């Protein structure tokens, strides 16, 4: 009787060892991120440079 209970317990424990199935795993396609042409922050430099050029032109003209 003890061997029967032990065999039943071992077979129950062995059957729950597989959490998944034998099916092929589904592998998703990798995510591709396309970079867009980002404007640089150098565009904000033009206004101070133009103002500096105007001030320099006024100082040189005097």
Image (tube, helix red, strand yellow):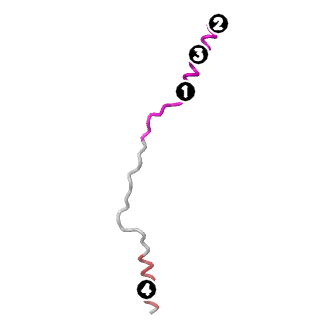
Q: How far apart, in angstroms, are the residues tagged by discs 3 and 2?
A: 14 Å
Name the residue beneath numbered marker 3. 53
Upstream in the sequence, badge 4 or badge 3? 4
* Residue 8 on image: x %, y %: 43, 85
Q: Which of marks 4 and 1 is nearer the N terminus?
A: 4
User: Quick check: marks 4 and 3 in contact, CB under 8 Å?
Assistant: no
Q: Mark 2 points at which residue?
A: 62
Q: Which of marks 1 and 2 is nearer the N terminus?
A: 1
Observer-side mark, 2 or 4, equals 2
Instruction: Categorize mark 4 by other alpha carbons within 10 Å: few (<14), some (14-19), many (20+).
Output: few
**C-alpha span from label 4 to label 1:** 79 Å
User: In the rendered image, which residue does mark 1 sit on?
Assistant: 44
- The 10 Å Cα crowd at callout 2, few under 14, some 14 to 19, many 20 or more, is few
Please name the residue shown 45% across and 78% down the image.
13
Which residue lies at the image location 46% right of the left edge and 86% below the top edge?
6
Residue lying furthest left: 23
Q: CA separation, marks 2 and 4?
A: 107 Å
Cα–Cα gap, marks 1 and 2: 29 Å
The residue lying toward the viewer, choosing from 14 and 56, is: 56
Report the residue at 41% width, 48% height from top: 31
């Amino acid at each position: 009787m003890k061997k029967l209970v032990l065999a039943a317990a071992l077979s129950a424990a062995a059957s729950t060892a597989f959490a998944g199935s034998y099916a092929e795993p589904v592998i998703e396609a990798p995510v591709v991120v396309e970079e867009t042409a980002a404007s640089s922050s150098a565009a904000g430099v033009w206004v101070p440079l133009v103002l500096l050029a105007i001030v320099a032109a006024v100082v040189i003209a005097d």
